[in-house]
Amino acid sequence: MQLETYISDLLFRYECVVIPDFGAFLTQAVSAKIDQETNTFYPPNKVVSFNEQLKKNDGLLANYMADVEKIPYESAVKKIDKRTRELKSYLAQGETIVLNNIGEITLNSEGNINFEPSHSLNYLTEAFGLSQFVSPSVTREVYKEEVEALEEAVPLTITPEKRASTSSAAKKPYLKYAAVALIALTLGGFAASNYYVGQIEQHNQMAQEEANKEIDSKIQEATFIIDNPLPSITLNVTKQSGNFHVVAGAFRVEENCDKKLEELRDLGYNARKIGANKYGLHQVVYSSYETRTEAQQALYSIRRNHNRDAWLLVQKLK
């Protein structure tokens, strides 16, 4: 029995997969990152860890095994229990347990379990197809400080063309005076234009203020009388929120999704549709919850009383 295959399948959909009487594998999403020393880009992924304190059977692994192997739930529990005893025996003998695509488990000198996760598989479905890559660093030359120093030393822009010679420039001093006159006229034109534009903006602002005062005075003088006011109505609307959803099913045809929704509401569940997933399946949930504890309690109750195939979805809805 390839127990690690079932665990690996479930880690794509759940954040916690428990091996009864052994421990739990947990996943935590981490953002994309860059290693500046090696110029390596890493995509977002899920980091796998192990907690030997979580040993209580939540039914997730056994239900999945029973569904895949088409065996009763009790038979799946027995097979998991047998495999758990084997794993403990291997650890007690000092062997290293290698779980494909999950990690390696060993026992330290104090009798505690050490877990080294595997990085061969990314369990974050949103990052499917993304892999790490190395990009060479980009070398840039910064000339900002040099340009600022030149602008302070030379206030006028100098064209790339060089003068023919210093002596020819000296022979034609009237060109220098003509350039000075041209600059003076240009600056004067800009000043006059800015002054004219400022006067227009000031006039427009005063006209706008007078119009606003006139409108305010007319609004204050107006009187509104309602002879037959409508009675007030109080509506109590309960909006579901939370990122933890107990899923009843996912359907390719939306009509079947609507039928399932009506069936659950007739049974008294606060059911709703949360849209289609990335596979195009329309999802119906029993309800949504703010915390994982509330969602897990509801999931246990629903599996015990109504639907053994219900499962927990952790997703932030838009």
Image (tube, rainbow, N blue to C red):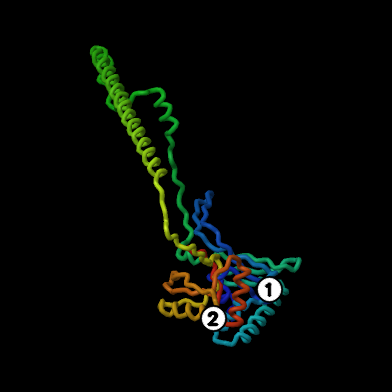
| Residue 120 appears in the picture as rendered | no
Considering the numbered disc 1 on the image, is that residue within a helix, a strand or a loop?
loop
Q: Nearer the viewer, residue 90 or 185?
A: 185
Q: Residue at x 55, y 75 (%)?
A: 311
Q: Amino acid at mark 2?
A: Leu
Marks 2, 1: nearer the viewer? 2
Q: Nearer the viewer, residue 83 or 274?
A: 274
Residue at label 2?
A: 267
- Residue 64 vertical position relative to residue 200 in the rendered view, above or below: below
- Residue 264 vertical position relative to residue 245 in the rendered view, above or below: below
Closer to the chain start, of discs 2 and 1, is: 1
- Residue 179 location (% of width, % of height): 27, 19
Number of on-image labels = 2
Residue at label 1?
A: 55
- Residue 161 location (% of width, % of height): 27, 26
Q: Amino acid at mark 1?
A: Lys
Q: Quadrant of the N terminus?
A: bottom right
Looking at the rendering, which quadrant does residue 314 occupy? bottom right
Q: Residue at x 48, y 77 (%)?
A: 261
Q: Is residue 259 left or right of residue 198?
A: right
- Residue 2 location (% of width, % of height): 58, 79
Q: CA distance from mark 2 to mark 1?
A: 33 Å
Considering the numbered disc 2 on the image, is that residue within a helix, a strand or a loop?
loop
- Residue 41 vertical position relative to residue 246 in the rendered view, above or below: above
- Residue 201 vertical position relative to residue 164 in the rendered view, above or below: below
Q: Nearer the viewer, residue 252 or 114?
A: 252
